[in-house]
Amino acid sequence: MKISKTSLLTIVFGLVISQAGWLVAGTALLRVVYVDKWHFISEDHVPPFGLLAGLSVLLLGAGVAKGWAIARALEKEKVVRGRLLKVERGSFSGENMLESTLYGMTFGYTDATGLPQTLQIDRLRKDLALGEEVSVLLDERTGEGLLELDLPGGTKFANFQGTQPIDPKVFLRVLAIPVLAFAPLLGLVPSVAVTLQRLEAWTTISLFCIWSVVVQVLWLFANLRYFTFKSTNIGRGCAKPTKAVHPAHPADESR
């Protein structure tokens, strides 16, 4: 299966780290327009442009790399039905150095030869019940796995197989923050700048200048469950095939 450019866009932009990169990029442009050029906002209130630009490039670069890994896995087009057999709860230190809960989920599936196999996938969300069946993208050679529930932007495997078009709502979810990142450039238009200056004179905070960043933050958290976390185990060989467990006798959930 060949991933189209449109599908690749939803994968790359549908990652939390990519969305965060665009949010930082929007803040960097806000700094250029409303701090450095028009001085509507005190420079003490916004980090330096160099720091923001560097962080944005770092986050977006990591997002592109992760999205490309997911796209390569999707091109292998190995999708199986997995039944949740066991959930083990653990923890890890995330990229923000804060400890987060990690759920090791063991799924049972049948391979091409008809033999029962199991696959463990570590996830940040516990939204499945024991015995529930889901679609799993599987690379049997490397042991990588990705649930359909964790696809970027709320897409489905059928979207990448060409049997179902991508829902327009997916594009709205993943493109809203990147588009809003360029909103501060409107302040370069003299008439817009004058209007904003008058509006800012009525308030004690720079709300009218930072509106785009505020909307970006609200949109990110409102749609967070649709964005794939960078730690999703695909493209890194972290999902581990384990010894077969008979589906009729699933293990109990560890507490």
Image (cartoon, rainbow, N blue to C red):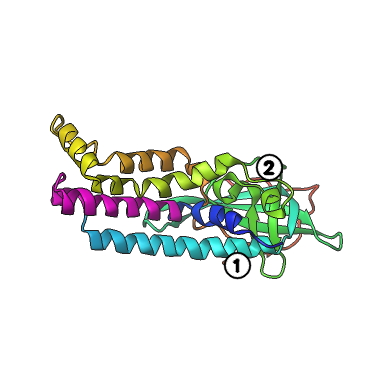
- The residue closer to the viewer here, 230 or 59, is 59
Q: Distance between the residues labelled 1 and 2?
A: 24 Å
Q: What element carries label 1?
A: loop
Say if 254 sits above or below 241 in the image. above
N-terminal of the pair, mark 1 or mark 2, is 2
Chain part drawn in magenta: 18-46
Residue under numbered circle 2: 130
Q: Is residue 176 left or right of residue 168?
A: left
Q: Is residue 240 visible?
A: no
Between disc 1 and disc 2, the foreground one is 1
Say if 54 sits above or below 191 in the image. below
Q: In this view, does 66 lie to the left or right of 217?
A: right
Residue under numbered circle 1: 237
Report the label total.
Answer: 2
Identify which residue is drawn at 39% across, 53% down.
Answer: 22
- The residue closer to the viewer here, 75 or 197, is 197
- Identify the amino acid type marked 1: Gly
Q: Do the residues labelled 1 and 2 touch (CB within 8 Å)?
A: no
185 magenta-colored: no
Identify which residue is drawn at 80% across, 60% down.
Answer: 111
- The residue closer to the viewer here, 81 or 153, is 153
